[in-house]
Amino acid sequence: MPELGVNIDHVATIREARKIDYPNPVEAALLCQRSGADSIVCHLREDRRHIQDRDLRELKKAIKVKLNLEMAMSEEIVNIALRVKPDQITLVPEKRRELTTEGGLDVLARAKRIKSVLKKMKKRNIKVSLFIDPDKRQIKAAMESGVGMIELHTGCYANARNKKEKKREFELLRASAEFAKRIGLSVFAGHGLNYKNTAPLRKIKEIEEYNIGHSIIARSVFVGLGKAVKEMKALVT
Ligand code: PXP
């Protein structure tokens, strides 16, 4: 049964809009956990636009489900991860001016750095996933880097402008997931997934986990966070 990871960054985005102390993303994470989230995802960005260092430390103490930290490979953030010790990290590319993570990690270009981060994380028993585009060369490079899991970037599928484009992106995700599984990788998926475009992906049996943030937090404005998580959980399982 596929699992649901809930990204709580945007609870912190609302807090940081006013630089005050609510809403608390840790409280949100606990509510997500109670409502069926199988893991909690957060991204400690270098510019700290939403999640702050103390959120990460408190999340680690408070939640029982898997804590998955999305992060860039900068020295500073790598050292924080080694100290806080989330269950898993997901390496993502990061540009300061982007609205959100725009593309997958270029594993071919960053192989050396990925291997060095992986070695450090292995020593601390932290699992490593790579957030990559549905591209066979990247998937193969991910496997060769020594990671055991990847998250396929679903942004192009989510943003497809018409049926034809959506079908093409879906098939690309399907072929990528099948290839990744065949060469021994666990396959996760995320980015831009919402209450409409997630269910069709269930046809791709290789996807073991969906990581979803923005649409769940947006829906929670109308139905409450608990219900928003439960509704999404029902779509992925
Ligand atoms: N997975 C990864 C690796 C991400 O970087 C993000 C965005 O932080 C997500 C999933 C969640 O994307 P969204 O907020 O669009 O659901």
Image (cartoon, rainbow, N blue to C red):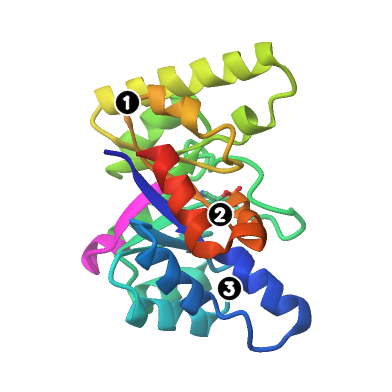
Quadrant location, the C terminus: top left
Q: Quadrant of residue 46?
A: bottom right
Task: Quote the CA–CA distance across marks 1 and 2.
Answer: 22 Å
> Residue under circle 3?
51
Is 114 magenta? The answer is no
Which residue is at the front of the view, 156 or 235? 235
Residue stretch rendered in magenta on the structure: 121-129
Question: Which residue appears farthest toward the top when viewing the image?
Answer: 164
Quadrant location, the N terminus: top left
On screen, residue 191 above or below 160? below
State the image coordinates of residue 136 (x, y, percent, origin top left).
44, 22
> Residue under circle 1?
205
On whether ligand 1 comes within 8 Å of the CB at mark 2, the answer is yes
Q: Which amino acid does label 3 sit on?
A: Ile
Which residue is rendered at x = 38% and y = 37% of the image?
A: 142
State the image coordinates of residue 167 (x, y, percent, origin top left).
58, 14
- Mark carried by residue 213: 2
State the image coordinates of residue 152 (x, y, percent, origin top left).
47, 36
- Secondary element under disc 1, as helix, strand or loop, is loop
Whether pointer 2 and pointer 3 mark residues with C-beta atoms closer than 8 Å, the reply is: no
- Crowdedness of circle 1 by 10 Å Cα count: few (<14), some, many (20+)? few
- Crowdedness of circle 2 by 10 Å Cα count: few (<14), some, many (20+)? many
Which residue is at the front of the view, 65 or 47? 65
Which residue is rendered at x = 24% and y = 60% of the image?
A: 122
Whether pointer 3 and pointer 1 mark residues with C-beta atoms closer than 8 Å, the reply is: no
Residue 174 can be seen, yes or no: yes
In the image: residue 133, left or right of residue 81: right
- Secondary element under disc 2, as helix, strand or loop, is loop
Q: Which amino acid does label 1 sit on?
A: Lys
